[in-house]
Image (cartoon, rainbow, N blue to C red):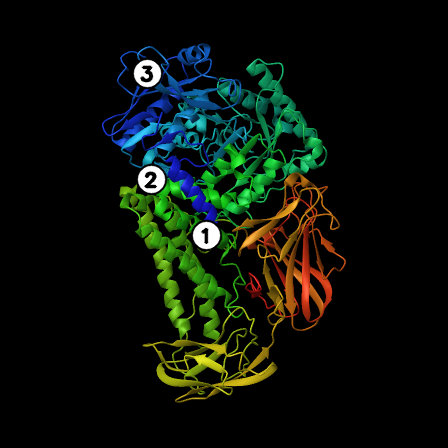
Amino acid sequence: MELFASIVFLCFVISGTTAIGQPASITFSETEGALKLGGTGQAPTIIIDSKDWAGVARAGNDLANDFGLVTGTKGKVTSGTSGLSNTSVIIAGTIGKAPLIDSLVSAGKIDVLNIKGKWESFTSTLVEKPVEGIGQALVLIGSDKRGTIYAIYDVSEQIGVSPWYWWADVPPKKHEALYALPKAKTQGPPSIKYRGLFINDEQPALTNWVKTNYGGVYDSRFHAKVFELLLRLRANYFWPAMWASKFHVDDSKNGPLADEMGIVMGTSHTEPMARADKEKVKPWDWKSNQRILKKYMQDGATRSKSWEVVWTVGMRGDGDTASPTLDAKTLVDVFSAQQNILKSTLGVSSLNAVPQMWCVYKEVGGYYQTGMKVPEDITILWSDDNSGNIQRLPVPAEANRIGNAGVYYHYDYVGDPRNYKWINTIQLSKTWQQMHLAHQKNATQIWIVNVGDLKPLEIPISHFLDMAYNMDNFMKPDSTDEWLASWALREFGSNVAQGTAEVMATYGKLVIRRKYELLNMSPFLYSITNYDEAEIVLHEWVDLQIKSQALYSQLDPATQIAFFEMVLHPVMAGRIVQQVYINAARNKAYATQKRMSANELAADVKAAYAQDGIIQKRYHGLLNGKWNHMMDQIHFGYNNWQDPSANTMPSVTTISTTAPSSGLMGVSVQGSAASAPESTLSLLALTPYTPENRTIDIYARGSGSTDFAVASSSPYISITPSHGTISYPSGTSTIRATISVDWSSAPNGNSTSTITITPTSGTPVTLSLHLNNVAVPAAFKGYVDSAGAVALEMAHFTSRTASSSGASLEVIPNYGRTHSGLTLLPVGAGTQTTAAGPAAVYSFYSFASASAARIVAYLPPSFNVNPASPLKLAVAVDGGTPVAVSPVPSSTLGTMPSGWSQSVINGVRVVKIEVGRVEPGAHELKVWLLEPGTVVQRLVVDLGGVRDSYLGPPESVKVGF
C-alpha cells in the first residue's frame, strides 16, 4: 500500500487537485495555456442561462461561494454575457436547456458527441472567445440537469472544497491562485444509474439533533443540506427518514426541493408508491382492504407524478414486518394494480422508461423463490443480510431484464442478531468485495445504502458512492487502499494522508471482528489464557489511538475538528469500549486466581467507562454544539437485539486483600487458568520457531510486598526480569517475566528444564519448561510448525499457479479480521476446477506426525449469490486428492443459511477440512477457490496443537522469504 499511496500522492501534487479519482482540470500554479479563474482579490463570473434548470443555478451559486471559501473572494453568478471582458469566466449549462451552450455547440466551439443523450455526463473545456467580449472561458456542459450539476461541483472539489465541508467540517483548502488547465475533460455516464442513501434508524441521535436544529421536523432546511451533500458526492437517489417522519407531509416544500435540486426520490422497501410508512391506512391488508389501498397508492402517484421518482412497488406488512395474508399470487396482483396506476397517472402506455423498484428483503424473498413473475420493467433490488453480505445477485436467466437489478446494502441496522447504530463499524475492503461482485454480476441499476444517522458514517458513505459513480477506479483488489489514501489527502492534507489511510485500514480489521453492541455476549470472545489474545487486541487498539493522536497533533486547529469527527473519535471511542469489555473479562479471570490486579482492573473498567461519557461530551461540544446529540446512541449493555434503555457498565469483581496462607506471591502461565502455588504448572513448549513470547506472571494475592527471584535450571535459559518486587496496593502488583533461550547452546531435540520463582516469604513455585531445539533445512521456504499449529495469512503464499483461462487468485489487502483475503478474479471467470483452475501454494514444515490433520479455513459470512453455483474452495496437502468444500449451506430466499447468526456476530465463518495424516517434514498446502465470490481470510493447519481462541493462533514464523 505504501508504494501505491506514494504514487497517488505524487499524481495529486503534480496536478494540484484534491478531487478523488477524477481527472484533473484545475491547478494551483500558472501553467502554459491555463486560464486563471481566481485568486486573492479575484473571482470568476459564472454564467448560467436563466432558462436552465433551477438546480443548475443553485449549484452555480454554491460554486461562487466556494471560490470565496478558497481564495477569500466570492464569485458572481449571472445570466448575461455583457461587460465581462476583464474578468475570468465560467459558463455552465445543459444541452438543450441553455441557449448559450447550444449556440456554442452549433458554432462548433464545443464537441458534445461523447456526452449528448447520455445519463448524467459532462464535459469541461477551455473555449476561446465563446461570446463577443470574452476572450476565454471555462465551459462546463452537462448532458442533463445532474450532468451539469456534477460538472459544477467537480470544480468545487478540485479547487479545495470537500463534499463534507459542512457535514464533517472539513475546512476548505486555501489557495492564492486557481487555474483551469487547457485540456478537455469528460465524465460519465456513472457506473450505477441510481446511487443513494437511506436515512434510517434515526432515533435517538439524529432525531434529537433535528429537534435541536430544525424544531423536530425533517424539513426542507434539513433536506437542503442532505441533498447538497448527495450531489457533491455525485449521488442522485434518496430514501428519507421514516421511523416517525412523513417526507411530503411534514414539509410540503420537501418534494419540490428534491426535484429542483436534482434528487430522485424513493421510499424504502416497506413504503410503496412514494408514500411514507406513517401515512399508511388501516387495515394494511391487500386481501381485505384492496379498494382503500389502491386509492392510497393512487394518491401517492398523483402527488409525486411531476417529480423524478424511483417508484417502490410491491408491499410488505404494516411497518417493517411480514404480512400475515400476503403471498406470491397476491403480490403479483399488487404489481398489476400499481403499474396500472402509474400508467394512467403518468399518461404512458409502457413503463419501460419509468423507474420502478421491488426490494427482495427478508420474507419477500420467499415469494420470489416460488417462481413468481416480476414484470420485466421493475428493477429487482437484491438485499444484503443487514450485515453487509449480499444474499443474491442476478443469475443468467435474469440477465436481460429491462429493469435490471440493484443492491440494498447496510451500514446500520436494527434487528437480529443485534442493533448496530452507534459509530462506524464498516470494513471498506469488505464493502469493495461485495459491491465489486455486484457490479460484475450486472446489478447496476440501483445501489442504495442504509446509513442510519448519516453523520458517523462519512468515510464508508464516500467510499460507497465513489464506487457507484465510477467503478472503473475500483477494479483492482487494492483499490480501497488507494482510495483511502486519496480520501485522506483531500480531507486532511498530504502530511497525514498516508498515516490516516493506514489507521482506517487497521480500524476496519479491528471493528469487523465484532460489533460494539455484541462485545458483552457470553462467553467473552477473546481468550484470556491462550495466545495472550485479549491483551494483544487491547494493545492493538491502544497503539491505533496513539498513532491517530499523533496524526491529529500535526494538523491545524480547523482540520483537527474534521479529523476528530471522522478518524480520532471512532478510534478513541472504539478503544474505550474494547478496554471496558476486555478488562472486565480479565478482571473476572484474575479474580479467580486471587490476583490483586483484578481490583486494579475493576478500577480501570470504571475509569474507561467514564471516559466514554467524556468523549461523548467532547463530540457534542464541537463548534459550539453544532453536533450535539449525534452521539446519543446507547452502545453498552445490550442483552438482546433491541436498544437497552441506558448505557450500563459490565459488572466487575473486587476481591479480598487478605493473602492466602500459602503466601502473598502467586504465579500463572500462558495457556492455563490455574495458578501456583496451589496448582502445579508447566509452561507451554518452546521451539526456535514459536511466534509468541513465553511469559510468567508473578503477582500479589493480597496487601503487602515481597521480593522474588527467578532462576532456571539450565544456563541457556534466561528470564527477564530475573528478580523484582510485587506490592499492593502501592507499587507494582504484577510483574511479567519473559523467557528467552540461547538455542545455539541448548541441546538438540527435546529437553526439559525448570524455572523456580522464590519469594522472600511464602512458597516457592517451580515450573517445568519443555524445549524442542529443531531446525528446518536451510533451503526450505515457508511457514514453520509451532506446537502442532501452522497459521497462514493469505497474502503470504509461497507461490501461485495461473489458469489458462486468465483466472487468478488475488490478494485483497486489509480484508478480514487479521491481515488480508484471497479471492478468485475476474468475477466473470466462472466455475473453476482443481485440474485447471488457479491455485495458491503455502509451504509449511512440521516437526511431529499428525494422524488426523485438518485445515481450518476462516471465511467471511458470505452467501451463495447464485444458488446454482455455491461458493466453493478446495485444499490438498502434498499432491493428495483435493478436498472440496461448499462452506455456505444452501438456503432459500427469505431464510438464512445454517450458522448465519454466529457467522455475522463473529465476522467469519469457520470451516474445518479433514486432510488425513501428515508426517514430519516439508509439506505443500495447495488452495483453490472454485467459484467467484469465494474469499478466504486465513488458514490454520491444525496438527493437533491449536488451542481455543477467537482469532486463531498468531501467524506462524516464516523462513526463506
Quick one: 425 or 267, which is closer to the camera? 425
- The reply to whether discs 1 and 2 touch (Cβ–Cβ < 8 Å) is no
N-terminal of the pair, mark 1 or mark 2, is 2
**Is 653 on the left or on the right of 339, as rendered?**
left
Question: Which residue of the protein is positioned furthest toward the left in this rendering?
Answer: 41
Is there any visible trace of residue 201 in the rendered image? Answer: no
| Mark pair 2, 3: CA separation | 37 Å
**Label 1 residue SS:** helix
Q: Amino acid at mark 1?
A: Tyr
**Mark 2 or mark 3: which is in front?**
3
Residue 26 in sight here:
yes
Q: Identify which amino acid the numbered label 2 is placed on.
A: Asp
Q: In percent of the image, x 60 and y 22: which residue is there? A: 338
Relative to 903, 44 lies left or right: left
Label 1 to label 2: alpha-carbon separation = 22 Å
Q: CA distance from mark 1 to mark 3?
A: 51 Å
Residue 601 spot, x, y in % from top left: 40, 68
Q: Position of residue 449 (x, y in %)?
A: 51, 37
Would you name the residue on which mark 3 appears? 135
- List the residue tagged with mark 2: 169
